[in-house]
Image (spheres, helix red, strand yellow):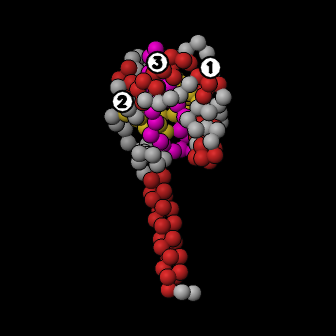
């Protein structure tokens, strides 16, 4: 084997080992690291009986942990009529089908925790279909994040909306 090929194979192995190590470290961390899923929350003050969720609408992102498996991720969130709502996009793309496993597992266990400013809020996730409020919810996401989502994206299953309901 030539010296150049040996170096190239060694370099590729180093990249693979580095990425694997990074993913292992992030998955065992207390929460996500930007776009990389993290482990379950280990820190934060549990807060109950919140009646006004508008403070979450002021945040660009929140951390969301689901229970099956116990992992956390960074999410976009809007509050529509005092209802916190998250959106999972790219559900019908090849990458989305591999990468976005948590929305599909919500059917088995819909418990979730939001962490924002070091506070933990327990919820259940309920997937929303298209109804009279969908256009207004999508408009809120588009206005806040500058995205081009449409009601058709929800109807066709390209994007999924989940309402976070208190009381879990």
Element type at marker 3? strand
Label annotation for residue 130: 1
- From the image, tell me which residue sits under label 2: 59
Which region is colored magenta? 66-88
Side of 62 relative to 130 (left or right) = left
Report how far apart the C-alphas of labels 1 and 3 lie in the structure. 15 Å
Q: Position of residue 62 (x, y in %)?
A: 41, 34
Number of callouts in the render?
Answer: 3
Side of 126 relative to 10 (left or right) = right
Res. 67 image quadrant: top right
Q: Position of residue 133 (x, y in %)?
A: 55, 14
Do residues under tags 1 and 3 come within 8 Å of each other at their CB atoms? Answer: no
Q: Quadrant of the N terminus?
A: bottom right
Side of 27 relative to 45 (left or right) = right
Mark 2 Cα shell of 10 Å, populated few (<14), some (14-19), many (≥20) = some
Residue for point 62% across, 33% down: 158
**118 and 162: which is toward the camera:** 162
Mark 3 Cα shell of 10 Å, populated few (<14), some (14-19), many (≥20) = some
Report how far apart the C-alphas of labels 1 and 2 lie in the structure. 25 Å
Element type at marker 2? loop
Res. 89 image quadrant: top right
- From the image, tell me which residue sits under label 3: 80
Q: Position of residue 37 (x, y in %)?
A: 48, 47
In the rendered view, would you say 55 is above or below 29? Answer: above
In the image as oriented, which residue stretches furthest toward the top? 132
Q: Which dot, 1 or 2, sits closer to the camera?
A: 1
Mark 1 Cα shell of 10 Å, populated few (<14), some (14-19), many (≥20) = some
In the rendered view, would you say 40 is above or below 85? Answer: below
């Amino acid at each position: 084997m030539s010296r150049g090929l040996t170096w190239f194979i060694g370099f590729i192995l180093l990249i693979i080992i580095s990425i694997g190590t990074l993913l292992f470290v992030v998955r065992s961390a207390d929460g996500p690291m930007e776009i990389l899923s993290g482990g379950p929350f280990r820190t934060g003050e549990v807060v109950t009986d919140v009646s006004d969720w508008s403070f979450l609408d002021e945040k660009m992102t929140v951390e969301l942990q689901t229970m099956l498996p116990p992992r956390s991720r960074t999410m976009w969130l809007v509050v529509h009529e005092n209802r916190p709502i998250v959106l999972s996009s790219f559900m019908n793309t090849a990458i989305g089908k591999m990468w976005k496993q948590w929305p599909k597992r919500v059917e088995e266990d819909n418990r979730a925790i939001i962490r924002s400013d070091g506070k933990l809020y327990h919820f259940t996730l309920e997937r929303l279909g298209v109804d009279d409020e969908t256009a207004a919810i999508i408009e809120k996401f588009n206005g806040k994040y500058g995205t081009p989502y449409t009601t058709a994206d929800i109807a066709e299953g390209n994007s999924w909306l989940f309402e976070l309901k208190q009381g879990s």
